[in-house]
């Protein structure tokens, strides 16, 4: 017998039809309008790990919420992510996702390993997650990403008994996109802020080390980019110290670059300007003007 006021066709499997969420203005909207969410390997890795926990179908329920802008706020802190998600009721639901922060011993091991190679610091400074960073944490005995569903403590104030509910799932998707924007958010969740980590790496590196000269034959666009990033890594200054008038570290030794480097990066000139042969004539001039007087 159907419940009063409802026809049997309005129910699905004995459960009431899903309610529509309230319309939200100014919520956090996922950048991905369709398809997968997550632009970089670290955000995709995070979502792949969640889906490996057999949470894929439940996570999908929250993708529409994330794209509708139902998540009103999202905050990452050591050991916990909190969010406010607007559902069908007037009061937004409170979401919490816990992941244990690493101990100081674990972070000490990780920081020593990262400090041994300036490129790790440089990539993080450039907003990138080093591809082997996950292995660095594994070697320290502390996987960066959760290894099983039990590693996560999930809660939502909604009446849905499923975990994760669509409010939690929407939070996961937007959390992944926040990792795209700032990979340090993953590290903060695990217990280290951007400022604390970079300051510690610079301290371990002794304020910077001289860079070796760059061999002209080995110059590539990617190599030049990484070289510049490594130079920046040695110039990390604590934000608070800088604005408070603290001591600025000495500049590292500049890498030796060929004087005609700029010419090498430009496309070949067109015929009206002399064609590719123009570069041959200009190179000696760059060598003269690019040489510092003794």
Image (spheres, helix red, strand yellow):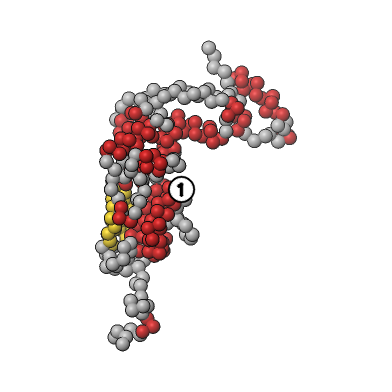
Q: Image height check: is 9 above or below 128?
A: below
| Total numbered labels | 1
Q: Is residue 31 left or right of residue 105?
A: right
Q: Is residue 127 above or below residue 213?
A: below
Residue 131, position in %: x, y?
Answer: 45, 42
Q: Check disc 1 and report the residue beneath it.
A: 41
- Evaluate whether residue 253 shows in this view: yes
Q: Residue at x 70, y 28 (%)?
A: 278
Other-residue count near label 1 (Cα within 10 Å), few / some / many at <14 / 14–19 / ≥20? some
The percent coordinates of residue 127 (x first, y second) are 43, 41
Left or right: residue 259 versus residue 27 is: right
Q: Is residue 71 visible?
A: no
Q: Position of residue 56 (x, y in %)?
A: 40, 61
The residue drawn where x is 48% and y is 31% is 228
Q: On the rendered structure, is 280 left or right of 50?
A: right
Q: Is residue 224 above or below residue 64?
A: above
């Amino acid at each position: 017998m159907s419940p009063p006021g409802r026809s049997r066709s309005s129910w699905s499997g004995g459960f009431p039809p899903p309610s529509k969420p309230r319309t939200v203005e100014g919520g956090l909207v996922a950048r991905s309008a369709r398809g997968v969410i997550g632009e970089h390997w670290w955000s995709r890795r995070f979502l792949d790990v969640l889906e490996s926990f057999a949470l894929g179908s439940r996570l999908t329920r929250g993708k529409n919420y994330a794209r509708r802008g139902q998540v009103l706020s999202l905050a990452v802190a050591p050991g916990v992510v909190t969010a406010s998600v607007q559902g069908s009721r007037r009061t937004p639901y409170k979401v919490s996702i816990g992941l244990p922060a690493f101990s100081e011993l674990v972070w000490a091991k990780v920081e020593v390993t990262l400090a041994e190679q300036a490129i790790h610091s440089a990539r993080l400074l450039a907003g990138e997650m080093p591809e082997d960073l996950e292995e660095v944490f594994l070697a320290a005995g502390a996987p960066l990403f959760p290894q099983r569903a039990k590693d996560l403590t999930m809660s939502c104030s909604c009446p849905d008994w499923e975990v994760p509910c669509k409010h939690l799932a929407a939070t996961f998707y937007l959390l992944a996109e926040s990792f795209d924007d700032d990979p340090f958010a993953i590290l903060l969740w695990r217990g280290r802020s951007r400022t604390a980590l970079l300051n510690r790496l610079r301290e371990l590196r002794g304020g910077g080390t001289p860079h070796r000269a760059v061999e002209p034959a080995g110059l590539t666009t990617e190599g030049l980019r990484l070289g510049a990033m490594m130079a920046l890594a040695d110039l990390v200054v604590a934000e608070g110290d800088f604005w408070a008038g603290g001591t600025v570290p000495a500049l590292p030794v500049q890498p030796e670059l060929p004087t005609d480097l700029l010419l090498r990066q430009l496309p070949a000139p067109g015929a009206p300007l002399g064609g590719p042969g123009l570069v041959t004539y200009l190179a000696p001039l760059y060598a003269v003007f690019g040489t510092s007087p003794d």
